[in-house]
Image (cartoon, rainbow, N blue to C red):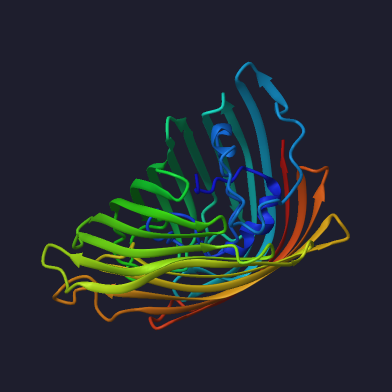
Amino acid sequence: MKRKYRGNEEANHHVAIFAYVGTLSGLLLNGLAVAQSILLPPPAYITTPTALQSFQNDEIDVFAETRPNDSNVNGPFSLGPLKVRPHIFYQFSYADGILARTNLPVRTVIQQLSPGILLEVGNHLTLDYTPNWNIYSDNHFRDVFNQTAVLTWGGEYDDWLLEASQKYSSTSAPDIQTGTQTTLKEYLTSVSGSYQFNGKLSLDLAASQDFIFPVNSFGTNSSIGNLENTREWSTLDWLNYQFWPRLNVAVGLGLGYDDVGSSPSMVFEQYQGRIQWRATDKISFQLHGGIEDRQFLDGGNTDLISPVFDGAIQYQPFDTTKLTVSLQRGVRASMFQNRATEITSYSGGINQRILAKFYLDLNGGYQVIKYTDTTAAGLAGPNRSDDYYFMNVQISRLLWTKGKIALFYQLGDNLSSESGYSFLSHQVGVQLSYNF
């Protein structure tokens, strides 16, 4: 099987931080986030059932071995087939330039506390629940209780490798696109399967149902307008051929339908190709891309035909140094009424291990966000375009194998064609985390 499954290991942070914008992750078709928080988000705890971990394929991933295997295979608390693995995260930060409303940047101290728990039931089922409290010193923001729950099932059955997951999240944070604190509720259901015809040819099938409900935390106002609920059903399927152990190519077909509140609904098709190549032991290339044709229904605009792609280069010149360059482009329904969002992003990063237990992470990038009117009558008004630049610096130290302390600095600079959405933000803070 050629699919890649990753476990929930603390040290994966040093690889994941390179994918700050979301490269090679997220939604099935293009991985684009419907909302983009200005604040540095808490870590995501990825659950992978034991039955899937045994199929982990390291032929392409240069950074696969990020830490020694955990000797405590039963976890801190075990009862028969049930294993309980708590985890906790705390972040204290000071930020300026955060948009409380359009045209209103403020300074605030933010405290985030996330005590979560991962349950492993046998080898095929995991459940992770992570609550998150965000407390602001500035009363322009509302203190919030966020939460995320992820249920994952998977295993091998005959010649199939199958996986299914259900995610629920409720989050509220200052958002780049809305220019204010925005609550987002998401219900994401996904199923996937891989079938190996022979040593060369395989098939990957995937489908998802994604319901997203955004809410302005301070109520609708004239600077934001109405935020739209979106219900998306999509599939992306690949036929793979392995030329040799470190070179895989594939052709893919994606189909989807977006039911977008009172705005024109959308149907889209994607025609893509994919290559995964481990050129040497130190460098690999992964890229998929092609063309998307998006049609706007119910009296909508003309078709939007655009390129879509998602890729990354991994390079490890030395055992202690990891470099990543990533790029991404995709289209999805916007939170705003009568708009679609096109996002193109480029980013790069370096992770340097220092003195065995210290890590230096540097990453930065550039993102273009364009909002296209989906109506034939131009009801959404002039098309908005944002240029967003970011940089993140973090120095961290491992604590007792499973813990980490980190100091970070983040810069975010957004230049918008629409008045009120531009900002320049600096954030500095400390993080503490521990995974049992």
312 sits left or right of 289 in the view: right
- The answer to whether residue 282 is visible is yes
Residue at x-position 68% and y-position 60%: 93
On the image, the x and y values in percent for residue 212 come to 35, 51
In the image, farthest residue toward the left: 299
98 sits left or right of 211 in the view: right
Q: Which of 267 and 101 lies nearest the eye of the viewer?
A: 267
Which quarter of the rendering shows the C terminus?
Answer: top right
Q: Which of 413 and 350 lies nearest the eye of the viewer?
A: 350
Residue at x-position 18% and y-position 63%: 264
Residue at x-position 63% and y-position 25%: 83
116 sits left or right of 309 in the view: right
Q: Quadrant of residue 214?
A: bottom left
On the image, the x and y values in percent for residue 70 come to 74, 37
- The answer to whether residue 410 is visible is no
| Numbered circles on residues, count | 0
In the image, farthest residue toward the right: 355
On the image, the x and y values in percent for residue 277 come to 55, 63
Above or below, 397 against 73 in this view is below
Q: Quadrant of residue 316?
A: bottom right
